[in-house]
Amino acid sequence: MVEQHTPRSLIVTFYGAYGRAFEGPVPVSALIRLLGAAGVDAPSVRSSVSRLKRRGFLLPERTADGSAAYGLSEEAQQLLDDGDRRIYGTPEPSDEWLVAVFSVPEQERSKRHLLRSRLARLGFGTVAPGVWIAPARLAEETAHTLERLRLTPYVELFRGAHLGFAPTAEAVARWWDLAALAKQHEEFLDRHGPALRALESGPEPTPEEAYRGYLLALDSWRRLPYADPGLPRDLLPADWPGDRAAAVFAELHARLRDRGTLFARP
């Protein structure tokens, strides 16, 4: 499957990786230069920035010299801070679960769809209609998301252990589509494993090459810790590819992130 790095996704990835290092908002001219290095043309940058502004992710501002620029909204900053823990963190083993139970009136069914889609994007599995489950460490991020979307009146959150009656590993295989998650990990390995091998055997990349390689790898990787919320390793198949995918991303991060900063610096 051919991967699509959309301009809007790459802009979000850029702000998460490098944009927050700017002192103040990121000038539009810098966005065009830095997204251009990843293959995004100027009209696409401008139209994608406009869409992110309408969504409330970016705020129009001015730099000290009066140039047009864009900064992060407060909600976007919170979203990226939550993402840092998810994307770069190592899940700590725990047998505690977070359970979300929700009920939405029929006349507000659009909110039911929004609630289901956001819980799915946070990595929740489905136990039953209106009952979703995730590792307990996602409680704070889940609360932030529900508060941001004003969905808290429809949801109750609980923390606890799975007591039965099926073995927990069997239950997890029902709550999540593990085959689909494994496929996503394998696809990441197919796309970015060769890039890591090239780095290991070839010359050191230039700052621009490191920046471009890291931006594309992160744009691929950042979705995986949401699709796969870091389920306990002993509940997953023995040959789980998530371990290898995480190791490849960690090595790409170590080799490319800081060197790419030399190109992306304000």
Image: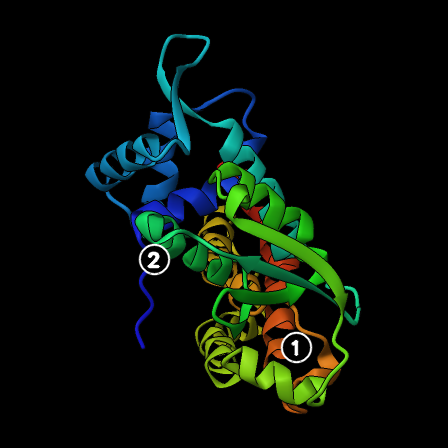
Specify the farthest residue to the left: 43
Location of the N terminus by quadrant is bottom left
Residue 140 position in % (x across, y down): 68, 47
- Let me know if residue 258 appears in the view: no
Nearer to the camera, 149 or 196 = 149
Residue 100 position in % (x across, y down): 59, 59
Q: Is residue 101 above or below residue 81?
A: below
Specify the farthest residue to the top: 65
Nearer to the camera, 67 or 138 = 138
User: Residue 26 falls in which quadrant of the image?
Assistant: top left
Count neighbours of disc 1 (C-alpha within 10 A) and say few if under 14, some if 14 to 19, many if 20 or more: few
Q: Which mark is residue 5?
A: 2
Q: Is residue 101 above or below residue 181?
A: above
Query: Which residue lies under the disc numbered 1?
Result: 243
Q: Amino acid at mark 2?
A: His
Mark-to-mark CA distance, 1 and 2: 24 Å
Count neighbours of disc 2 (C-alpha within 10 A) and say few if under 14, some if 14 to 19, many if 20 or more: some
Q: Which mark is residue 6?
A: none
In this rendering, would 233 be left or right of 133?
right
- Let me know if residue 95 appears in the view: yes
Q: Amino acid at mark 1?
A: Asp
Label 2: which secondary element: loop
Q: Residue at x 65, y 68 (%)?
A: 230
Q: Residue at x 48, y 56 (%)?
A: 103
Q: Is residue 151 above or below residue 132?
A: above
Residue 243 position in % (x across, y down): 65, 77
